[in-house]
Amino acid sequence: MAEMKDILVPDIGDFDGVEVIEIMVAAGDSINVEDPIVSLESDKAAMEIPSPFAGTVKEIKVDLGDKVSEGSLLITVEASESSAAAEETAPAKEPETAAPETTAPAPAPATPAPAPTAKPASPRPSPTASIRINEEGFKKAHASPSVRKFARELGADLSQMSGSGNKGRILKEDVKVWVKQALSQGSGGGLGVEPMPEIDFSEFGDIEIQELTRINKLTGKFLHRNWVTVPHVTQFDEADITELEAFRKQLNEENQKDGIRVTVLAFLMKALVSALKEFPRFNSSLDHTGENLILKQYVNIGVAMDTPDGLVVPVIRECDRKSLIELAQELVETSHRARNKKLSPVDMQGGCISISSLGGIGGTSFTPIVNAPEVAILGVSRSVMKPVYKDGEFVPRLMLPLSLSYDHRVIDGADGARFTSYLSRVLSDTRRLLL
């Protein structure tokens, strides 16, 4: 006769208040002895808690993010008689930890499995077997032991992946997506090239080792992925913002008492709203198969911001529903939160197109990297006064350099040129922002 059993956190060593980062079962699931039920993570290691008996999950007693310790109740299970008997005879198993990577082979099951009907002549190679795994990066990757094992079986390098789970944790779905991309592009993570050689630079002189910030590391992974998976094209253009700049200064004088300061960036966002409505293909994303285009009916714009710890791209939402002043105020607030590390992962999701502005630093043009799954990004350099031939004579005009990078799978060169030409017209005549 089945009986109800509580599964508690076993002896997990000298840890207290460990976070629940993954729940691997749901009410109604049938589980076997040693099946992982939850994954816990401390500051030093990740560990999976196995079930001590088989049965049916009746109730989950914890939520993601909960802090548990030895003896905390995890789930209740309706256990079978055979499971209860096995529990009395089977030795307790310590929870698996994330490190080290190599573990001892599992003991043979009590009941021998039937012999296979056919045995292959040789093991079938993994479809990603030619990919070189960065062992050090693999060990440091933010993933549970089961995901690590899954990645090992597929020959997938966790160090090259971006996690979609809680706190950037790599899930099995992330591994599957990465493998699909690697297969569609060929082995070697889409490049098939030899890794960079390991060099001892201290042989040539004194050196200092400076660890990259967490933002640097994450940004590097995202940019590397986007660069090797998106066929980039960059279109360059200029916009005459002489009248816009005069109007901007007038607005700032009028709103000085309220502490409102409108930047060129706010005008760019309004211009992009107008351009995305005119060219809806730029407000889209390819689905995960790469065979369907998802056209978005909203306008959220990402704005690249330089912080002491590295580059972040928070998203300003519903830009098509906000006034120029509202966008200017939100840009100031978002920039303040970015510098003070107050941005959450949600703040950097859901963008339609991004802006990378280097106008406050300098330069004449550059090639920004598309922030996939977006299909375009607008780069802006420092405006400069130039002689422009107009009405039979050269006159000084303030020109703003534009650099539009786009995904050539979605946007062709003609549309890229039309988009920047439209932007230039809108920025040159602010009245067009009202259309």
Image (cartoon, helix red, strand yellow):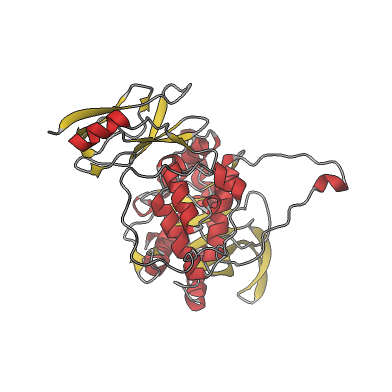
Of 359 and 32, nearer the camera is: 32
Of 118 and 279, nearer the camera is: 118
**Residue 58, picture quadrant:** top left
Vertical placement of 46 versus 231: above or below? Answer: above
Residue 250 visible: yes
Residue 305 visible: no
- Where the N terminus falls, by quadrant? top left
Residue at the far left in the pictured view: 1
Q: Position of residue 40 (x, y in %)?
A: 41, 33
Of 373 and 300, nearer the camera is: 373
Residue at point 31% right, 30% down?
A: 89
Residue at point 52% right, 47% down?
A: 250
Left or right of 43? Residue 108 is left
Of 43 and 122, nearer the camera is: 122
**Residue 435, picture quadrant:** bottom left
Vertical placement of 175 versus 92: above or below? Answer: below
Vertical placement of 212 versus 157: above or below? Answer: above
**Residue 270, picture quadrant:** bottom left
Q: Position of residue 343 (x, y in %)?
A: 47, 38
Count of marks, rendered view: 0
Q: Position of residue 66 (x, y in %)?
A: 35, 29
Left or right of 366? Residue 53 is left
Residue at point 50% right, 41% down?
A: 104
Q: Position of residue 281 (x, y in %)?
A: 39, 69
